[in-house]
Every structure is written in C-alpha cells, then in structure tokens.
Amino acid sequence: MSRGRKPSSYLRSNNWDDIFWNSLSTYIGILNNYFTTNNYEFVAIGDCLKKLSFTIPKGLNSKEIHSSGNHPVISQSKEYIIGFSDRTELLVDKDLPLIVFGDHSKTIKYVEEPFIIGADGVKLVKPIGSFNARFFYYFIFGIITDTKDYGRHFSLLRNGLIAKVEDLELQVKVVEFLDALKSDAFSNKNVFFNASVENEIYELQKNQLKGNDISTELTHQLTLVKKLRQQLLQDAVQGKLIEQNATDEPASKLLKKIKAEKEKLIAEKKLKKEKELPPIKPEEIPFEIPENCVWCRLGEIAYITSGSTPSQTAFAASGIPYLKMYNLRNQKIDFFHKP
DNA sequence: GGTCTCGTGTTAGGCTAATG
DNA sequence: CATTAGCCTAACACGAGACC
C-alpha cells in the first residue's frame, strides 16, 4: 500500500524524508509561484471534486477496530493505518486512489488500496479526471495553513486554490519530481520539468537539513504578502490607490439617476413600491471615502426580492438561466456550477 | 403568478469524553 | 497533557405547498 504523510512523531527528527514532509507546503508555494508566473489559472478545490460513485460508509466504532484482520482501517489520525477489521461490507474499494482528509485533524493521506473508514471526521476526496490524483494530493498540502484548533477544516480545503494544469504529462512530471525528492539519493542533474524551480526546492531542502531557517522566513514573507494583499484590497475599496479623476461623474449624481429610474419603474408598475429606507447615521459609516463617492443602502440601488423554487416542470433545457444559491460562488455568478 | 412558510436532509461548528 | 472520537446543535439549501 502506498503510504501518505508520515506520523507526527517522525516530524521532529532531522532526516531528509522528514524535512520533505515538513517543508512540503513551502515547496507547493514555490511550485504555485511557478504556475502563477506561467499564467496558469487557479481553481477552487471544491470545484474540482468528483462525486463518488458510492455512498460513503459510516466510520467504524473504535471497539470494532482490531490489531489484525482482513482490511486496513484508516481514520483521520496521524498514523496511516489505525488497525484492521473484517467488516467487508464497509470496504471502500471503488474510485481508488482516494485522498483521505481529516476534517478535524487536517491529515492528508493518499490511499490506493481498499480500506475501511475509522470514525467520523474522515472526508474522501476524489479529483475530477483532468487532475492526476497524486498531483492533487501533493498540492493539497499547500492549502491549509490556518487552523481552527480541533474544529472542522474541510471547508478551508474546498475554498483553497489549485493550479489548473491541463497537461497531464506535466502533472505526472511534477509528481515524479516530488516523489524523487523524498529520497536522499535525489540528484538535481536529472530535470523533471523545470531545472530552475527544481533546483530552488532542492537547495531549500539541503539548506533545511543544515538547520537553515529559510522555510520559516519564507512562511513569514508569505504571511506579509497576504497582509499586503489585504491592505491593497482595503485601500482600493477606500479609493486610496489612485487619484480621483476630476472628470468622473460624482456618485451622488448617479444615485439620483438610479432613484429616478426606480421611481419611473414603480410608476409604470414594473416594480413594487418599497418601504422608505432609514437615513444613514454617522456611526454606521465604517471608513472615510473619497469626495466624489457617497454611501447608500443596497436597497437604494437594487431591487431585492425573494421567491420559491419553481416546480421541476417549469424548467426548460434552454432559455433564460435559472440561478440557485449554489451558483453564487467566490463573489461571482457561476452559471454552470452544479453541486 | 408571486410570495411566504414549513419540513427535510445535509453540513459545519464546537463541546466533551475517551484514550494513550 | 495532547490527541482523537463521537455527539449535539445551528445553519444552510432545497422543494413543496399554502396563501394572497
């Protein structure tokens, strides 16, 4: 059976293989930079998961897990296998290989052979066909850096981004590189997909072994980049990034136009008359905005309505798309998404 | 026909007991 | 004491049907 991440007790030691697992998320960061630089699109993990062809069996009760048996039991624990069971009816033997994700513990395991699920909190992850499963497995290590103590983490995983590398051969080469890097016999004379990236990771791995704190520094820098990104977004919203163009129409004028348009639609009975919205109090204003901008309530610029789901017979194969809650994804409307 | 409400199944969050 | 297992509950999403 192909083993996933090593148990935590190994992580504190100082050998080549352990450093690999300890630093994998950093390496994935470097690889992601490479994909970003080469204009690869990044997609949400949640959009790349394949629906399993079977109903996931409920996890075994701990009393039913034995020290020997016909089938290995895999839970979200750090140990790859926690025991064995003969409950063949609970065997997960379809859609393999699968990635086992510990919703509580954040463990990530790559499983190729049939197994039985131990306890709850185990999420089975199967990427869609455009992904090599092992490529997907490795890149998941770069995603969950935040922790919610012993809360659930699957939502973080689903919201994480992965490079959409359509070239399956390239995915395999990246996987081969990472697999080879786990061995201290690794030599960077042999190029898998990109000499410079591979060398960067190899050098990092070597430096790690020397007790170098590059990884810590890199993680620190990535955190700073994240903070910078958040600040940029905040500044953009507050209009601090660029000078206001003097020729731009003031927002107050635009707001008046919108109000007039709404009143016209109400007069034409195309919209229902809405309740008067309360004026914005000074204490409601979260931050200062440029002179040309103006605060308003969402209801002033939009028509907010609700309704129920039409019956199945009302749906047509073509025509105006019908949006459901699940079509609203990552602050965008995704007309094609299906849960 | 449009809107509202309720029932049902699923998922996420979090607490705590059990375990080693 | 840290980690893991398991349970409870809130929130979400959807669909059906009642109501105006």
Image: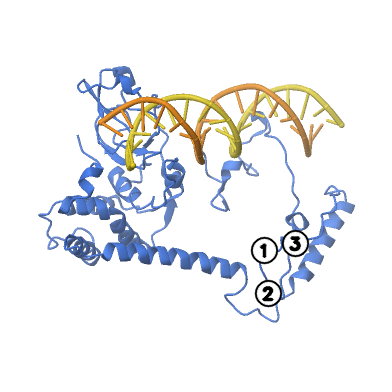
Chain colours: A blue, B orange, C yellow
> What residue does disc 1 label?
A286
Q: Are marks 3 and 1 in contact (CB under 8 Å)?
A: no
* Element on which disc 3 rests: loop
Label ID, residue A296? 3
Q: Position of residue A163 (x, y in %)?
A: 37, 55
Chain letter belonging to callout 3: A
Corner quadrant of residue A37: bottom left
Q: CA distance from mark 3 to mark 1?
A: 12 Å
- Which chain hosts label 2? A
Q: Residues within 10 Å of mark 2 (few under 14, many from 20)?
A: few
Name the residue that disc number 2 marks. A290
Q: Is residue A248 visible?
A: yes
Classify residue A177 by image quadrant: bottom left
Q: Is residue A321 above or below residue A90?
A: below
Residue placed furthest toward the right: A267
Kindly identify the residue that appears in the image at 65 percent across and 44 percent down: A320
Q: Position of residue A233 (x, y in %)?
A: 54, 66
Residue flagged by tag 3: what amino acid is it? Answer: Cys
Three-letter code, disc 1: Pro
Which secondary structure, mark 1? loop
